[in-house]
Image: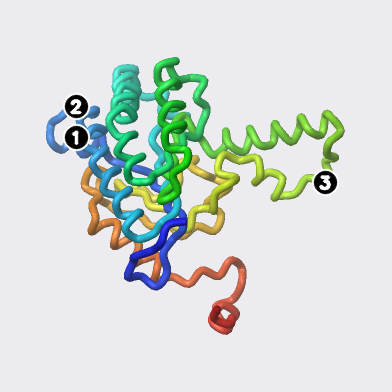
Amino acid sequence: MAVSQSPYSSVPRHVAIIMDGNGRWAKKRFLPRHAGHRAGVSSVRKTVEGCIAHGVEVLTLFAFSSENWRRPAQEVSLLMELFIVSLERETRKLHENGVRLRVIGDRSAFAPLLQEKIAQAEDMTAGNRKLSLVIAANYGGRWDITEATRQLAAEVEKGALTPADITPEHIEARLSLADLPEPDLFIRTGGEQRISNFLLWQLAYTELHFTPLLWPEFNETAFEAALASFASRQRRFGQTGDQIENQPTR
């Protein structure tokens, strides 16, 4: 578990981010869209560093959704190339800084080389504990829930469960992030205010933070602003404010 050095009274254990606005950042500068995706890698590095500095335990980044295959073929191809290059360049740095890398989503659609690079990166960093960096690639929240319910259906078919036995905990235990805390803070850059099929189950009680900054513009100051916003909120989880305020301090 990471040890927090943060000045904030409350720090999220798990931050989830939709990194939106790479293409618009490039367009504003009369550059091809893939230039925005390359520029966004720097913001990933800064955010990883910020999480470590503040003692965040998990950072989940939405890198490529299951719907992104609908984008122009050239852009998808360049994104896949960038994914491979980033794994080759960044994995050792992550390992040296105690970061564990995981990729969630349906990998079967990726080229064999990319699948191999993902597996190598996960194996190299598997023992690290300072930060878990989760990359959601070819991922969708509906896909995640569907996969979980498919597993439950198979167990019912085998007689290991009955439909009446199934609880929300059964579904949660079969989701991609089952072994990690649910996100406390969700950030979306780019000015859009929706969650776009990202971690649909896990975001049920997550605090939402939207910023107009495009992802390549998201820097240390912007991350600090998101953390400050989170620290100012009262998380009630169905209780009243008075109940939360009157709880004994530990």
Which label sits on residue 26?
1
Q: Amino acid at mark 3?
A: Asp
To which quarter of the image does residue 133 belong?
top left
Residue beneath disc 2: 32
**Whether label 2 touches label 3, CB < 8 Å:** no
Q: Residue at x 55, y 78 (%)?
A: 250
**Marks 1/3: CA distance?**
51 Å
Residue 230 pos. (x, y %): 40, 65
**Marks 2/1: CA distance?**
6 Å
To which quarter of the image does residue 154 belong?
top right
- For discs 1 and 3, the disc positioned in front in the rendered view: 3
Residue 6 pos. (x, y %): 34, 66
**Marks 2/3: CA distance?**
53 Å
**Count of labels shown?**
3
- For discs 2 and 3, the disc positioned in front in the rendered view: 3
Tell me: 120 left or right of 220. Answer: right
Element type where label 2 sits in the image: loop
Q: Residue furthest left?
A: 29
Circle 3 residues within 10 Å: few <14, some 14–19, many ≥20: few
Along the line of sight, the residue nearer the viewer: 171 or 84:
84
To which quarter of the image does residue 223 belong?
bottom left
Q: Residue at x 58, y 82 (%)?
A: 248
Along the line of sight, the residue nearer the viewer: 229 or 7:
7
Tell me: 70 left or right of 200. Answer: left
Which label sits on residue 165?
3
Q: Is residue 246 above or below residue 80?
A: below
